[in-house]
Amino acid sequence: MNLSEHFTLEELTASDTASRRGLNNSPSGEVLLNLKKLATALETIRSALGKPISITSGYRSPEVNAWIGGSKTSQHCKGQAADIKVKGMTPNEVVEAIIESGLHYDQLIREFDAWTHISISDTPRKMALIIDKNGTRPFK
């Protein structure tokens, strides 16, 4: 099922952990609405970057989130967050490009210099952070 032109429900709910453990990772109706909003935001980011985006993690049911050790308040559980990679760009470059584009986001996190976390909200905080072995701190 397409949520937007370039993003599907399947890729935003894919979970190796859910598959391996036999966990249900199907979104509720409310979460599905959030995933559609997230897909729209990802389309805007894709357009601003001029490159395709790979989703490494999208929606996580609370049970899946617990298995991977995710935060109990993770926006992934609400369908409001995705971890992304962009071929030919470092996570740092992705964060910088999104900030410079003026796009609305709730949190933008360069995580372990391996991927970029993007979340949306009806009341965006525009928080840009770095999370790595040294802890959590503001992005620049």
Image (cartoon, rainbow, N blue to C red):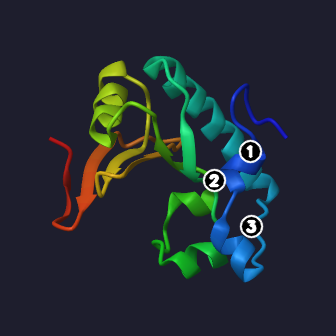
Q: Nearer the viewer, residue 40 or 7?
A: 7
Q: Percent x, y for residue 124?
A: 43, 40
Asked if the residue under mark 1 is in contact with the one under mark 2, i.e. CB atoms within 8 Å, the reply is: yes
Helix, strand or loop status at disc 1: helix
Position in image of residue 106 (x %, y %): 42, 43
Contact check, label 3 and label 2, Cβ < 8 Å: no
In the picture provided, is 57 more to the left or to the right than 34?
left
The residue under the point 25% across, 52% down is 130
Amino acid type, label 3: Asn
Q: Residue at x 75, y 77 (%)?
A: 23
Residue at image location 33% in from the left, 41% down from the top: 91
Determine the image quadrant of residue 65.
bottom right
Q: Residues within 10 Å of mark 1 (few under 14, many from 20)?
A: some
Amino acid at pointer 1: Leu
99 versus 135 height, above or below: above
Q: Nearer the viewer, mark 3 or mark 2?
A: 3
Mark-to-mark CA distance, 2 and 1:
8 Å
Q: Which mark is residue 79?
A: 2
Whole-angstrom CA distance, mark 3 to mark 2, is: 11 Å
Q: Secondary structure at mark 2?
A: loop
The residue lying toward the viewer, choosing from 119 and 82, is 82
Gap between marks 3 and 1 measured at Cα = 15 Å
Tag 3–tag 1 contact (CB < 8 Å): no
User: Are there few (<14), some (14-19), or many (20+) residues within 10 Å of tag 3?
Assistant: many
Locate the C terminus by quadrant.
top left
Q: Which residue is mark 1?
A: 33
Q: Is residue 72 left or right of residue 98?
A: right
Helix, strand, or loop for circle 3? loop
- The first of marks 3 and 2 along the sequence is 3
Which residue is labeled 3 in the image? 25
